[in-house]
Image (cartoon, rainbow, N blue to C red):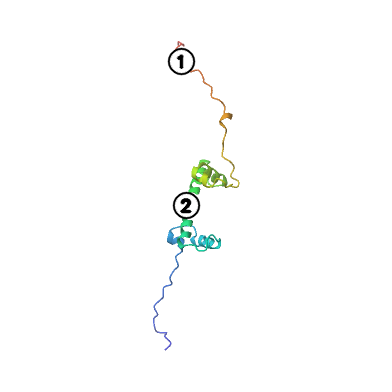
Amino acid sequence: MSGRGKKVAAVKAKTTISRSTRAGLQFPVGRVARMLRKGNYAQRIGSGAAVYLTAVIEYLCAEVLELAGNASRDNKKRRIGPRHIQLAVRNDEELNTLLGGVTISEGGVLPNIHAQLLPKKTHRADSSKDVNSQEF
């Protein structure tokens, strides 16, 4: 009996679901886990550590991208450039403390004019007081 006439139940291949998909993340959890293991940060790395670190990195990137998108829209540009990332990071208090020692290439500097260099305000005499003296 060769078994040609028998119908064999089709075995469903189990599709692998990535850890990024399970965690609901866009960034690769497997790659971060590999980098944690290869980086010799500790002898043993927990399975949740890579997921947590990936979620933190994804959140920070989303925050910077949102602020940089707002900065590019303020400058009437449709593409985010290094200048917009620089403006976004330096204008946000928390991101500025986190990335205080980071140099962003082609980012430029924040526009800042010292208060002493600004022209002094002069008080003008109100012209509304002299309106009554004129007769028509």
For mark 2, give the secondary structure.
Answer: helix
Decide which of 5, 131 is in the foreground and name it.
131
Residue 30 in the image, given as x and y percentages of width and height: 50, 62
Seen at 50% across and 48% down, the residue is 64
Disc sitting over residue 36 in the figure: none
Q: Position of residue 73 (x, y in %)?
A: 50, 43
The three-letter amino acid code for the residue at tag 2 is Tyr
Does 25 appear above or below 86?
Answer: below
User: Which residue is at 43% across, 61% downward?
Assistant: 22
Which image quarter: residue 112?
A: top right
User: Residue 8: image x %, image y %?
Assistant: 40, 80
Residue at mark 2: 59
Q: Residue furthest bottom?
A: 1
Of the numbered discs 2 and 1, the one sitting upstream in the chain is: 2
For disc 2, the neighbor class at 10 Å (few under 14, some 14 to 19, many from 20) is: few
Any mark on residue 129, and which?
A: 1
Looking at the rendered structure, the kind of residue marked 1 is: Lys
Q: Secondary structure at mark 1?
A: helix
In three-dimensional space, the C-alpha distance between marks 2 and 1, rounded to whole angstroms, equals: 59 Å
Residue nearest the viewer, comparing 107 with 3: 107
Residue drawn at (51%, 60%) of the image: 32
